[in-house]
Image: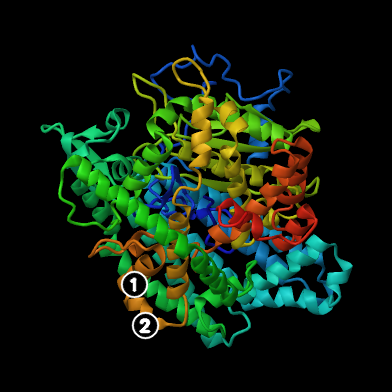
Amino acid sequence: MLTFNRVLFKTNNSKLLNSISSSISCILNNHNNTIKYTYQQQQVKSSSSSSPSFKYSTSSSLSSSVYNSSRYFSNSSVTRNNNKMTIPSAEKIQKDINLRFPSKVEDFAPRIAKMIKDHEQGISELIAIAKDKRTFVNTIEKLEFLNLDFANEENAITFVSNVSAVKEIRDASNAAESELNKYSIKTYMREDLYNAITEYVQVNPDYQTKLVPQQARLVKKTLEDFEKNGLQLPKEKRDRLKEIKEKISDNGIAYSQHIAEDKTTVAFTKDELKGVPEDILEGFQKEEGTGKYLATLKYPDLVPIVKYCQVTETRKKMDYLNGRKCIDTNLEILQNTLKLRFEAAQLRGQPDWASTVTQYYMAKNATNVRNFISRMTDLLKPHGVEELKRLQELKKSDYESRGEPLLEPEIKSYDYQYYNNLMLVKDFQVDNNLVKEYFPLELVSKELFNVYQELLDVTFEEVKEIPIQVWHPEVKMYLVRDNQNKDVVKGYFFLDLYPREGKFSHFAVWPLQPGFKLDDSHSSLPVAAMVCNFTKSTPSQPSLLTHDEVVTYFHEFGHVMHNMSSEVMYPRFSGTSVERDAVEMPSQEFELWCWDSNILNRISGHYKDGSKLPTDLVQRMLDSKNLNISLFYLRQLLFSSFDQKIHSNETECFDKLSEVWRHYAKNVALIENQPNTNPAANFGHLFGYDASYYSYMWSEVFSADIFSVFEKNGIMNKELGRKFRTQVLAVGGSQDTSITLKNFLGRDPEEAPFLKSLGLTK
């Protein structure tokens, strides 16, 4: 998952949807053995933990554990080239990375004050220019680079709310975000600044033909920023819109913080957790005095229980608590936000919020989105009904084999993952606990890097002596080089792989600094952070990944490389700064490499002896890829349908969120949530991906189409991989994604490869 800045100075779609992280809220849809982290991803502005900043030397091993796997994998280098270039000096890296992560609460106030002061001074200078003296450089470009300086500071200051281990720092970061959001809203609603921008257009009415395409696009996008804030409206409406935007911003911060700070914990006996693998139980904390296992609603606890636990009441309890998470705090916030969004849409002359936001996306309007959702639902639902029947039959036979009465023959929300996994084992003999023994994190990391390096024609090198303050001693830092010009560093990324108290609890990538080059005086290298929560090693074994976690790793690292590949003229076009409904496309494509037998052989190695996944097991995994695939996507369509409905002009929905959710759960996903639950209270995408959740499935259509080209030409075809990097990843948001896709494919995109990948067509 990728994160996005809520503020307007988004030189890159950065701040992690505050976290649009991957929340697996409510029992999430685990299609076959692959949990799609792109789905109910919680924006959870998360309680990301991490301790203050540290300047330290890191070890070369990617595994943070007490288990020593070096005897099996002696080469822990992640680069394939033995002739490594010299790591840049500390001074050079410090110059390249214009980020300072706060380590003390008292750091925030003076930095925020200086940011605002410097930005306001620059704005005043821009406004003071006479109309007849306005040029692209002194008006449009000047604003762009003022925003760049502001955004780099903002990203560093607000990112730590997701990764600091110190609650006071997280709280200060959240407060800073609120203040900075209000400042950016105020700035982009300044009539004098808007007039300065429009003066440039008035003086240069033919700018679109005089400027190069990226410059003309920058003018267009800058004007859009102001139009989105109602600068064309009368002052009274403009003032009200400002109030609304500020309130929505604060609502989003509070909603996300409530999810991130959730402390729900349940104590279970070992018998109540029957079926949960021993290595998972080993990672649970225990209740003092009773010795019971303590389970939270965070991903590493929740998913194994609802997936493996044979005790129905235990799964039911976890599912129920997860479905009620933040109901008491977030439902009112969400209802208030929906009303405010609708009012904002009306002020801007739009019928509803969905129409307001989708006009800037690939879909172009809400009607196209709803038609897409409806078409996919109609296509998948008959297949979903049949899949559900087979799960019900399995449930019946399971109860018969245990000699227990079957009181609820239907598949309940707390049954789906359990019986889906049981079907995987019974029908395909794929045991995820066995499979993960072949995916030790250290080896997967090394081979994932090698796959990306080979495919995209780049090289990664670890910066072992990190010359800047980072947020935790477990953080690793790497640089990226282009193999065609290894003297040049293309970017830097951080990996933060393990869970800890207070840390953002899922998987996501934060673009922290944009990559662009206008000229030698106006350029910067991309910087991104990948935040994960892989299980740590134990005394008996290293950190092991399930196959779905391997898929997630490939997905999230795709976001990293989207940012690292940036070759644009202006910061706002960097990396993932594409239309919202296109941003997941490259990462979803990279997931597909994890379903190739050669890649699975390459990235696997048993943690005890290094042996590869058995050929027959690999084939069974591939055969199981589309197990209950229609039910999986129908649940995606539940999220998309709900999201569109509550952002439509049917305002009566705002106070009936539970009923609306239950309607789509029953009639689209085919599996209802439990009574007295309402997953909307912790559906983090509603802040950041509002009216945009459809983007995940929408962009999968394009990723499948692109992957079909690799299938025809070889999925490790370096020439094609480099073409993908330079023609798709590198261009970012510098042009419409529809143009990018057509340039790469040599034709208009097609839906057929996606439908074929689901097994719905031949």
Secondary structure beneath dot 1 equals: helix
Please determine whether, in this image, residue 734 is positioned above or below residue 49. Answer: below
State which quarter of the image contains the C terminus. bottom right
- Tag 2 residue: 652
Q: Is residue 214 visible?
A: yes
Secondary structure beneath dot 2 equals: helix
How far, Cα to Cα, is label 1 from label 2?
9 Å
Residue kind at label 1, given as amino acid type:
Leu
**Disc 2 crowd, CA 10 A, few/some/many (<14, 14-19, 20+):** few
Q: Residue furthest left?
A: 289
Reading the chain from its start, which is encountered first: label 1 or label 2?
2
Residue occupying image coordinates x 41% and y 54%: 44
Q: Is residue 400 left or right of residue 551?
A: left
Residue kind at label 2, given as amino acid type:
Glu
Between 157 and 18, which is closer to the camera in this rendering? 18
Residue occupying image coordinates x 35% and y 67%: 666
Q: Is residue 502 visible?
A: no
Q: Is residue 535 left or right of residue 220?
A: left
Which disc, if any, is residue 436? none
- Tag 1 residue: 657
Please determine whether, in this image, residue 614 is positioned above or below residue 49. Answer: above
Image location (x, y in percent) of residue 522: 76, 49
Between 103 and 371, which is closer to the camera in this rendering? 371
Between 301 and 618, which is closer to the camera in this rendering? 618
Q: Residue furthest top?
A: 71
